[in-house]
């Protein structure tokens, strides 16, 4: 691959060094080439003068086949550098590049697999989720693109949601899942220590623990209950069941289901909640549309949101498959 940003200076410098080294190898080889054996007065082949444990080395010339192998290597290097990029900004007589080869292979793959994806794009997500063959294809796409965050089993990790349970920050219906993958999500919870104060953070920690039935200090939890209704309920709801339960796409989690996105295994629940209240959280999932359907001519997000499910599936068939796979994880037949 040619670096298009390489300056002329560096291009010339690299070319000069490369050709100079090849020329030096040839001169060194030719300068040390000899075809006759040096003989002593007694008719024996002279030695190099080196001896080890009584063993001496004869000063024989390099075998011809070995010499020609070195010459062939030099010729191969020159031919290769003429045909392929390797000398600064020289692109090679064949015009080959790793980027060009990759684009050709991608185009071939798109053409070859397009009928398969088009077939699946014509099936709605709920039906597709029950198609074993389609889910095998979707699982491979998921593992290649999504497992780095959500894990190969889609069970998530610290800061990355488990996709196999029923705890959905934005909703787990087919179209909401598709929207999440297309647009991405940006969940922000600000720090509340300046609003709640030190005692307020401690009390609120106990109240949040009480919502999920965890062991807590009842007195401190009772003290925080009015403050929760005044400050926290606008996102989490007065019942603490989260924004999705109340039809809001804020990403505020359900605090009553004992599912904790930011709790480390060795960390106590109280410590995790208190850290969140003091420092806030910022979760980001980028849009996956361009990654899953490489080369798709994507309209603006506003135009996408106005499309029908059928139009979205046709435009983004691989994303449609992944949405069906994610839906299937928590909706087993």
Image: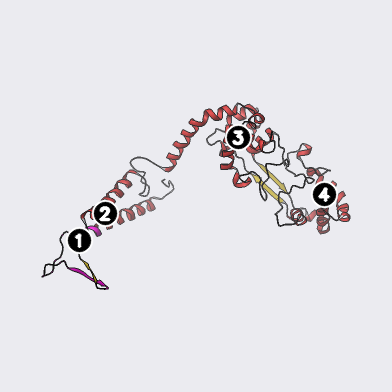
* Quadrant in which residue 161 is drawn: top right
Q: Position of residue 153 (x, y in %)?
A: 63, 44
The front one of 274 and 88 is 274
Gap between marks 4 and 1 measured at Cα: 88 Å
Q: What SS does tag 2 mark?
A: helix
Of the two numbered discs 2 and 1 in the rendering, the one whose residue sits closer to the viewer: 1
Instruction: Say which residue label 1 marks.
Output: 61
Verify whether residue 41 appears in magenta: yes
| N-term mark: 3 or 2 | 2
Within 10 Å of the Cα at label 1, are there few (<14), some (14-19), or many (20+) other Cα atoms?
some
Instruction: Say which residue label 4 marks.
Output: 213
Gap between marks 2 and 1 measured at Cα: 14 Å
| N-term mark: 2 or 4 | 2
Q: Indicate whether 48 appears above or below 320.
A: below
Instruction: Say which residue label 2 marks.
Output: 70
Of the two numbered discs 3 and 2 in the rendering, the one whose residue sits closer to the viewer: 3
User: Which numbered marker is on residue 135?
Assistant: 3
Magenta segment's dominant SS is loop
Of the two numbered discs 2 and 4 in the rendering, the one whose residue sits closer to the viewer: 4
| N-term mark: 1 or 3 | 1
Gap between marks 4 and 3 measured at Cα: 37 Å
Q: Position of residue 227 (x, y in %)?
A: 85, 50
Side of 102 where 249 appears, left or right: right
Gap between marks 1 and 3 measured at Cα: 67 Å
Gap between marks 2 and 4 measured at Cα: 78 Å
Q: Which residues are magenta?
A: 28-54
Within 10 Å of the Cα at label 2, are there few (<14), some (14-19), or many (20+) other Cα atoms?
some
Gap between marks 3 and 2 measured at Cα: 55 Å
Within 10 Å of the Cα at label 4, are there few (<14), some (14-19), or many (20+) other Cα atoms?
few
Confirm or deny contact between disc 3 and disc 2 (CB under 8 A).
no
The front one of 66 and 103 is 66
């Amino acid at each position: 691959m040619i670096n298009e940003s390489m300056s002329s200076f560096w291009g010339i410098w690299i070319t000069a060094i490369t050709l100079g080294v090849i020329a030096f190898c040839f001169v060194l080889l030719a300068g040390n080439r000899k075809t006759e054996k040096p003989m002593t007065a007694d008719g024996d082949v002279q030695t190099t003068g080196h001896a080890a444990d009584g063993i001496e080395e004869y000063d024989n010339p390099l075998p011809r086949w070995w010499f020609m192998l070195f010459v062939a290597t030099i010729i191969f290097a020159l031919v290769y550098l003429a045909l392929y990029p390797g000398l600064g900004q020289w692109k090679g007589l064949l015009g080959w590049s790793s980027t060009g080869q990759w684009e050709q292979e991608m185009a071939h793959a798109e053409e070859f697999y397009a009928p398969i994806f088009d077939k699946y794009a014509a099936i709605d997500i709920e039906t597709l989720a029950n198609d074993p063959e389609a889910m095998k294809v979707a699982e491979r796409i998921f593992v290649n693109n999504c497992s780095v965050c959500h894990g190969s089993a889609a069970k998530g990790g610290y800061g990355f949601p488990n996709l196999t349970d029923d705890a959905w920050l934005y909703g787990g219906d087919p179209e909401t899942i598709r929207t999440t993958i297309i647009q991405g999500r940006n969940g922000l919870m600000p720090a509340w220590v300046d609003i709640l104060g030190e005692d307020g953070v401690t009390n609120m920690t106990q109240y949040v623990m009480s919502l999920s039935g965890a062991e807590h200090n009842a007195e401190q939890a009772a003290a925080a209950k009015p403050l929760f209704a005044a400050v926290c309920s606008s996102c989490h709801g007065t019942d603490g069941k989260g924004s999705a339960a109340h039809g809001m796409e804020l990403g505020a989690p359900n605090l009553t289901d004992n599912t904790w996105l930011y709790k480390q295994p060795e960390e106590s629940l109280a410590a995790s909640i208190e850290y969140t209240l003091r420092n806030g959280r910022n979760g980001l999932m980028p849009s996956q549309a361009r990654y899953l359907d490489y080369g798709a001519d994507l309209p603006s997000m506003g135009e996408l949101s106005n499309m029908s499910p059928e139009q979205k599936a046709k435009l983004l068939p691989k994303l449609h498959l992944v949405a069906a796979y994610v839906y299937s994880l928590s909706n087993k037949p």
